[in-house]
Amino acid sequence: MADEYRRQGFELERRIFELDIKCSSLKAEKQDDDYLQNASAILDKLKTFYRQGEESSNLSKLLQDYTQVILDITFYEENKLVDQEFPEDCSPFKIQQLLQDLTEPEVLVTRLAPGQEVQSVLGTELLECLYWRRGALLYMYCHTLHQRKQWIKKNKDTFLKCIQEGVRYLMRMLQVRNSVKLSDGVVLHDSTTASMISEGIFSDTHLLTMMYIGEMCFWAVKYEDCNAEAAEPKEDCLQFRDIGTQILNKYVCACEGPLQGQGWSTENAKEILSILQ
């Protein structure tokens, strides 16, 4: 057991020092970036912990700190891609690398804390953020590709694959927290909050996720319909029309109901629904 614990600690330590090298390299590009500075501060704390030879009984906290570093570093890298409007020559590789980096915390939890749920180790907010960031990255990429009509004509399958992957990540984000059943002893004095939570909407990010899913489903339906004569869809393909309709109807109900007058527009959602339904 002791040998296994040391092996686990060594694997995490190795990754922390690898990330430190990467963070230092990125800081050379932009030293005043807030996210890189935050990642560097956490890494300094983690390096000090390992250099002092301490043994932590709180693997969960180490993995949470490691995950926050991943989130901060990849956020900086994502912003570079967005600012460059996703260059055609390098974006596919860089996006796959970012998706792999954002998946690694879950992989490490499975490997280093077997038998424990990822959510119980990382916490709800970090796990939601990992799914959100992967889905939002693919949304932004697809949003850019959607404007490159000639590229899509030649790479339609790749485009649809990116949409499907992005929608899956965003749907997983919405599923991290189970909708609270108000009959389960939960007392909420604010009826608006109660209504939102009962629908599984816990933040502005959850609402934005719904809109992203709706838009991506619309793009998928548009290009799937253009290819209607193609082979039958695979069993693992998402039903984009049904998913988009369901999610956007919930979005509109929330924005025109409990959130009415709080700045959420339903114009684009309604326009998409008129096409999907």
Image (cartoon, helix red, strand yellow):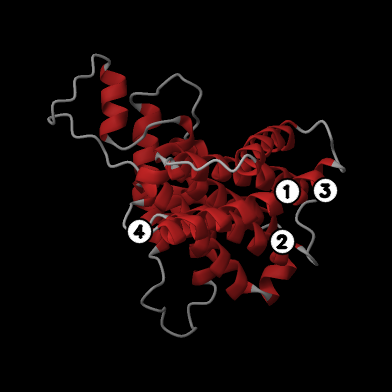
The disc label shown at residue 77, or none: 1
- Residue 223 place in picture, x, y as percent: 55, 68
Relative to 59, say whether 98 is above or below: below
> Which numbered disc flags the more N-terminal residue, 2 or 3?
3
Q: Residues within 10 Å of mark 2 (few under 14, many from 20)?
A: some
Furthest-right residue in view?
28
Q: Nearer the viewer, residue 40 or 269?
A: 40
Q: Residues within 10 Å of mark 3 (few under 14, many from 20)?
A: few
Q: How far is mark 2 from mark 3, CA to CA? A: 16 Å
Which of label 4 and label 3 is nearer to you? 3
Which of label 1 and label 4 is nearer to you? 1
SS label for mark 4:
helix
Which of label 1 and label 3 is nearer to you? 3
Identify residue for label 4. 242
Which quarter shows the C terminus? bottom left
Which of label 4 and label 2 is nearer to you? 2
Residue 269 showing in the rendered view = no
- Residue 190 place in picture, x, y as percent: 27, 15
Q: Nearer the viewer, residue 35 or 173?
A: 35
Q: Are marks 1 and 4 in contact (CB under 8 Å)?
A: no
- Residue 156 place in picture, x, y as percent: 61, 73
Relative to 141, say whether 29 is above or below: above
